[in-house]
Amino acid sequence: MSLSLLPKEEKFFELFEMQARHNTDAAKTFRELLGNWSLQSPAFDKLRDIEHEADITAHEIIDKLNRTFVTPFDREDIHELASKMDDIVDIVQSLSLRMQLYGVQHVTEDLVAMTDTLLQAVDCIRKAVPHLKDLSETRRILDYCIEINRLENAGDNALAHAITKLFKGKPDPLEVMKWKEIYEVTEDAIDRCEDVANTIEGIVVKQG
Amino acid sequence: MSLSLLPKEEKFFELFEMQARHNTDAAKTFRELLGNWSLQSPAFDKLRDIEHEADITAHEIIDKLNRTFVTPFDREDIHELASKMDDIVDIVQSLSLRMQLYGVQHVTEDLVAMTDTLLQAVDCIRKAVPHLKDLSETRRILDYCIEINRLENAGDNALAHAITKLFKGKPDPLEVMKWKEIYEVTEDAIDRCEDVANTIEGIVVKQG
Amino acid sequence: MSLSLLPKEEKFFELFEMQARHNTDAAKTFRELLGNWSLQSPAFDKLRDIEHEADITAHEIIDKLNRTFVTPFDREDIHELASKMDDIVDIVQSLSLRMQLYGVQHVTEDLVAMTDTLLQAVDCIRKAVPHLKDLSETRRILDYCIEINRLENAGDNALAHAITKLFKGKPDPLEVMKWKEIYEVTEDAIDRCEDVANTIEGIVVKQG
């Protein structure tokens, strides 16, 4: 029986795809903000809007889950996938806000590099998610998951590099405090992509 | 069948109400401590006692859950509700301890304002929890949850305000380090109230 | 029916014991590194290897869980136990890396004391885990859990002591930033041991 015949379940997949798009929208907007950094950039409001939309989508999934008896895969996996996807948008938006509060004047190369890695990771999620509704393409989904694991490793190395540079010489402690947080939060966002990949992998294996 | 006829299940509700009271006790004691700040205040010991009591209550719920076959609502929701309620007391108590360790001399207005928000949030939880045993008052519970969401937003804004002020001018980095943590932990406590509200909302919707 | 007759389930126990050994290996290696601190120590690579091995074991448990229908205890408990055990190795390894990045020159007594507590806690886990396959020795398992709770308390006190000392006088803010993180992460590793103990206790009570 093809899952696509089940309209109720279909809705879950649509919502997950929407979440994945919110994530790529958020990461792209953040990347553009960094490329053209200004404390008055309209990107801050745009990120707030995306976060708000993503919140509604996540809420819709949880609400639907609570009201639905038959679900396309395990209830706890739906819950986990929805809340972990939502974490990514939340982190990116609150990071942008924090940088604005800190009155950051210049963006570092290390942050741009880490954001590029994040962008690739959310893009892998966006490409993997539509395959969840037809698990015959297992190999493809798992390849995206492996790629996300690789990106998470790259993120770890980029963080190590950034932290080493940050503490070198006699830096201003307040600047170190701000940038240590900015880098660690960015790496945390990439980590959440790996969490999402692990959840997706679990779903695939269970159905396999 | 009225749930109130089931003595075993009744016990869960009693324990949740007890947890909610531990939370309001902790938040009130912390607020009083701030209003009359002294590193020798007896409030530190009182908070330790409340935390200890709350720990026992949480343990009792989990233990009861592990030994009970029929539960008033989903096992994982009971687990989540108990552990998230417990987080709030834990955070408040360890925050007070940390402030004592830091030898904080004066309390800021921003912290008082954030604590007032926390106080309102735990009070909403305290009012919502007794309705869990009779889900006919769904609207009322959900209104409390909406109010907690509003308070969490207010907490976010208060944190943003406090952080901005903290970094202004040429502050002492050690003071910034301490107060950044104090504010963020307070906001985290408010966030946990929202987690509790989300769990409660989920329980209500499922039974609805 | 003796569980040892069920080869499939037996495998879960073997893997948990392996995880427990990875944890003690990691804590021991970290403790040796501290006793003979050098930024060029081969212990850094050894910790990376242990973390890698532990990752494979954790993955094997989750994968096995996803492919197995009948499990020796609740699925969510297996998942929780596996992922919380894995957290400990992860934290210890990333802490060692962070200390290397910070170019830490001398190790403090406080860190050594906290690491000794961690070592005792992971050793309790290692001793408790083999009893999971034969729950007739409930008392013994619970005694280990109580001991881990005691150690977690000791860890809290050690952290309080270390933080107080760290902020005393007019310390270099950058050093405070580094060591505050090092101490807090170590305490977090001990906390995770308590999480593992709680999970184990839950498993025992449910089967009891």
Image (cartoon, coloured by chain):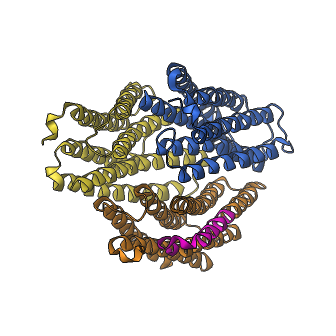
Chain colours: A yellow, B blue, C orange
Task: Look at the picture and state if C146 lies above or below A205.
Answer: below
Left or right position of B33 against A96: right
Query: Along the horizontal axis of the image, is A36 left or right of B176?
Result: left
Could you tell me which residue is drawn at 47 percent across and 72 percent down? C133
In-front residue for pair A93/C130: C130
* B76 is higher (above) or lower (below) than A149: above
Q: Residue at x 21, y 51 (%)?
A: A141
* Secondary structure, magenta segment, majority class: helix
Instruction: Evaluate whether residue C190 shows in this view.
Output: yes
Tell me the quarter of the image containing the C terminus of chain C.
bottom right
Q: Quadrant of residue C183?
A: bottom right
Who is closer to the viewer here, C171 or B128? B128
Q: Tell me where residue B123 appears, x and y as whole percent.
A: 66, 28
The N terminus of chain C: image quadrant: bottom left
Compared with B5, A80 (above or below) is below
Image location of residue B159, percent across then percent down: 59, 32
Percent x, y for residue A23? 32, 37
Tell how many labels: 0
Residue B107 seen anywhere in this rendered image of the structure: no
Q: Is C133 within the magenta? A: yes
The residue segment tinted magenta is C130-151
- Residue, x 52% and y 74% (percent of image)? C131
Residue B183 image offset from top left, x and y in percent: 64, 37
In the displayed structure, B184 sits above or below C118; it is: above
Viewer-nearest residue: C200 or A87: C200
At a point 62% along the width and 44% down the height, the residue shown is: B86
| Residue B174 magenta-highlighted | no
